[in-house]
Image (cartoon, grey):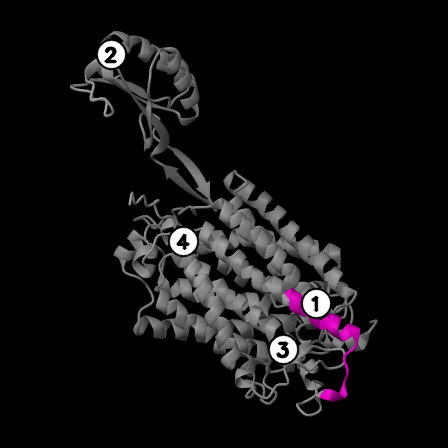
Amino acid sequence: MKLVTAVIKPFKLDDVKDALKAAGVAGITVTEVRGFGRQGGHTETYRGAEYKIDFVPKVSLSVVVGDDVVDGVVDAIVSSAATGKIGEGKIWITDVERLVRIRTAEEGVDAV
Amino acid sequence: MRKRALRIMSGLGGVIAVLAITPSVGFAQEYTPTAQDYLNNLWVFLAGVLVFFMQAGFALVEAGLTRAKNVVNIFAKNIADATVGILAFFATGYAFAFGESGGWFIGTDNFFLQGLDMAAIPEGGLSPATTFFFQAVFAATAVTIASGAMAERTKFTSYLIFSVVMCAFIYPVVVHWTWGGGLIADIQIGDAVFSDFAGSGIVHMTGGIAAFMGALFLGPRIGKYDSEGNVRAIPGHSIPFATLGVFILWVGWFGFNPGSELLADEFVSTIAVNTMLAAAAGALLTTITIWIKSGKPDVAMIGNGALAGLVAITGPCGAVTPMMSVVIGAVGGVIVVFSVLFFDKVKIDDPVGAVSVHGVVGAWGVLSIGLFATYDDAFLGREDAGLFYGGGFEQLAVQALMVLIILVWVGVTTAALFAGIKATVGLRVSPEEEFEGLDVLEHGLQGYAPDVAHSS
């Protein structure tokens, strides 16, 4: 099993959710996060004074999937979250040691 | 001008004239008020209700333009200065301002409203109850102006002390010197005597000067300037709050200015029109100015622009044409932007722009009477008194002198007050408390507490 973590632009969340559901993903966990990458934040003005937003609002979504569908899930996120502009975010994949469904105590891919 | 006798008594300045003909206790039954008398009192009372509603506007503007961690403190200060301020004005403020005896400096009787027949309505005038009600809500306005400039770093107890002294003594003296017939009212240059219809100077500049002194003695908030002294923005946490507050203040001003006519007559609506026009012109010119200056129509600044238009027209609203009201409001809207940027630069940290909106633009409102006055407003005693209407420099000179006197009095007394507070109970919270927010450490609760989910 793999944990797919994607940091995306907040306004792309709906598109990504639809694409993931179409790819057969059963559940998604979403977190509002802030951060910067190569985009490096941006500048705003307030009452005549400029100030820098170093940490730009983003949405992080986590999906646990079986090894066989990881590539399809990554493709779905890449194609639905792309805008062609800087600041679109990243996707990374990590191994999951163990997964348990609380209601039934099922383990492994059955619990996905 | 038409209705000379009524005009003499109109404007808040008419209060002393009204008091002079208020039947004293024992003779109160001699005059039976007419329907017009009741209308006068009812209108001024309702106008006072609108002015009191401005407290909500101030609270929202200040809360919106500051951070979420201090929102409880902002609302607490606004409740405190309204309640403490009204009681202080009741105890001594009204007596100092309007006490029946007293010289050029201060009134000396009617403490706690003693010796007044509260319900007695004199011919063509207001009962002491109506007068006190209207004056007390004005006092509450004058004191609350400083709250925003001192936001996010002032000890709650210290702010309470300031509120009491401001409403009990400092502001009432200004009122006595002007509408109460004291020092400033006695000044005459040529044919010119002071004019400040609803209080650009008496109320707003007074509050603005106190706000300046508060911000000066406190020093800037931690983080307002970087290590090289450059200005850093500290964005407020709710533009919706701030904007709603501006609209509430705007509505309240339709009591503040038209109510200051102190009568229900044909001029109430013309004053309302002047007030409305100046506010719109102020907001528009601020929009244009800040758009050019910083590239964006910044709503946090535009709100200040509407208020600047309102503050500017408060003094001249009874003496100028609609066209000149637009000009006065527009100039206020330009001044306020440069003033906010200026005070930022000289390290007077005023989170909401109170010093600029009320202090600087308040002075402009007083001076604008010397330029644009054309109608025979209360105490002007003549038409076309303004410089641009052939009145010469006399009116402008009196207005400038008035600004100077208020500046010195309020500046010196509030400086002494803040210095005294600083040396005794302390003025500012600790850096730790400022960082954590005043809500929890001063008041023991959060403004936006997380939902508690007790399962049993």
Q: Evaluate whether label 1 is on the same chain as label 2.
A: no
Tell me where residue B246 appears, x and y as whole percent. Answer: 56, 52
The residues bearing labels 1 and 4 have C-alpha atoms spaced at a distance of: 34 Å
Report which residue position mark 1 lands on. B43
Q: In front of the other: label 1 or label 2?
A: 2
- Say above or below: B89 vs A87: below
Q: In front of the other: label 1 or label 4?
A: 1
Crowd around label 2: few <14 · some 14–19 · many ≥20 (10 Å): some
Can residue B368 be seen? no
Tell me where residue A27 appears, x and y as whole percent. Answer: 33, 20
Q: Evaluate whether label 3 is on the same chain as label 2.
A: no
The amino acid type found where label 4 is placed reads Val
The residues bearing labels 2 and 4 have C-alpha atoms spaced at a distance of: 48 Å
The residues bearing labels 3 and 2 have C-alpha atoms spaced at a distance of: 80 Å
Q: Evaluate whether label 3 is on the same chain as label 1.
A: yes
Question: Considering depth in this image, is B213 or A109 the residue closer to the camera?
Answer: A109
What secondary structure prevails in the magenta region? helix
Report which residue position mark 3 lands on. B129
In the image, which residues are magenta?
Answer: B29-47
Tell me where residue B427 appears, x and y as whole percent. Answer: 34, 67
Image-based side of B103 in relation to A34, left or right? right
Q: In front of the other: label 4 or label 3?
A: 3
- Circles 1 and 4 in contact, beta carbons < 8 Å: no
Question: Considering depth in this image, is B171 or B55 the residue closer to the camera?
Answer: B55
Image-based side of A98 in relation to A49, left or right? left
